[in-house]
Amino acid sequence: MSNEKTITALNGYFMLFVCLALLSAGIFMLIETGNLWSGSLIFLSLLLSAGLVLVNPNSSRVLLLFGKYVGTIKKNGLFWVNPLFTKKKISLRASNFDSERLKVNDKLGNPIMISTILVWRVTDTYKAAFDVDDYKNFVRVQTDAAVRKLASMYPYDNFADEGIEEDITLRSSVNEVSEALEKEIQDRLQMAGIEVLEARIGYLAYAQEIANAMLKRQQATAIVAARHKIVEGAVSMVEMALDELGNKGIVDLDEERKAAMVSNLMVVLCSDKDASPVLNTGTLNH
């Protein structure tokens, strides 16, 4: 449970005026009268000025008094607090983190290279300051751990030829993988008072040692799929041609001639090169 406590400090502009007035009075007394009390006024002005705190927009100051948490100033402006307070600055701005490319194994054991882009910000200054040692380093380490876990949960791609068919893959299911990654990182960073605004995969590829083999495999799969479509279309066209010839009575073909015609049409339609026509100047039997 968060112990963050937001406090409102005194107006810093008023205390700045007081410090300048004490300093001016001390210097004037020292020059004019040489009174020792002038040194006390100068020391007091310097002591009070140590309590001035400038808080920029989307920034905060965590206040400690001899190791005890006092509160957090989140409102921007110039404020004054107890000069004995220790003031720790924590930014509330959204930060962008691009992780290094990690070499991990996917669900099928294939080595892949993966990195993530994370957008995060601090929402609980108490947790960020005291529940973890260094919250920025904590973000880096936990993000890398979450990416490694995510990569092991899903395969890089589907391989239908091996009977492996996954609903979610790292390559094709971008939205699902990003949601799972964001949830995993948020669960890890919650203890540090950090909110994950966005998490997505920034780089994804097979590792170098298997990249060429996997590229050839993908190309072969694409060629097989294309050939399958070509053959499927060619069969439909041959069937349509035979039906049209029979229905319109253009030519009467026996089974042997139909087989020859089907063979010729399939060669023409399925070939990856242009067919060379041969003109028959005789009869169909010669």
Image (cartoon, rainbow, N blue to C red):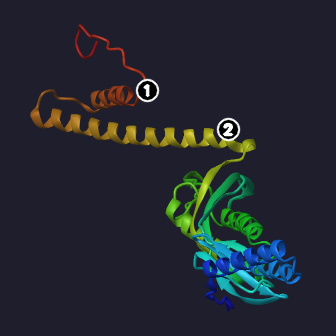
Instruction: Pick the quarter of the image with the C terminus.
Output: top left
Residue 111 in the image, given as x and y percentages of width and height: 73, 52
Q: Residues within 10 Å of mark 1 (few under 14, many from 20)?
A: few
Residue 5 appears left or right of 273: right
Q: Please, what is the three-letter code of the amino acid marked with disc 1?
A: Asp
What element does badge 2 sit on? helix
Q: Earlier in the sequence, mark 1 or mark 2?
A: 2
Residue 255 in the image, given as x and y percentages of width and height: 28, 33
Tell me if label 1 and label 2 are in contact, CB under 8 Å: no
Q: Measured along the vertical axis of the image, is residue 51 above or below residue 174?
A: below
Question: Which residue is farthest left?
Answer: 248
Q: Measured along the vertical axis of the image, is residue 225 above or below residue 111?
A: above
Residue 231 appears left or right of 187: left
Is residue 191 visible in the rendered image? The answer is no
Q: Which residue sits at x=42%, y=22%?
A: 273
Residue 135 in the image, given as x and y percentages of width and height: 74, 72
Question: Which residue is farthest front?
Answer: 33
Q: Measured along the vertical axis of the image, is residue 259 above or below residue 7?
A: above
Count of labels in the image = 2
Q: Which residue sits at x=61%, y=70%?
A: 56
Badge 2 is on which residue?
212
Q: Please, what is the three-letter code of the amino acid marked with disc 2?
A: Asn
Residue 282 in the image, given as x and y percentages of width and height: 23, 8
What element does badge 1 sit on? loop
Q: Which residue sits at x=36%, y=25%?
A: 268
The foreground one among 140 and 42 is 42
The foreground one among 114 and 78 is 78
Badge 1 is on which residue?
272
Is residue 277 visible in the rendered image? The answer is yes
Q: Residues within 10 Å of mark 2 (few under 14, many from 20)?
A: few
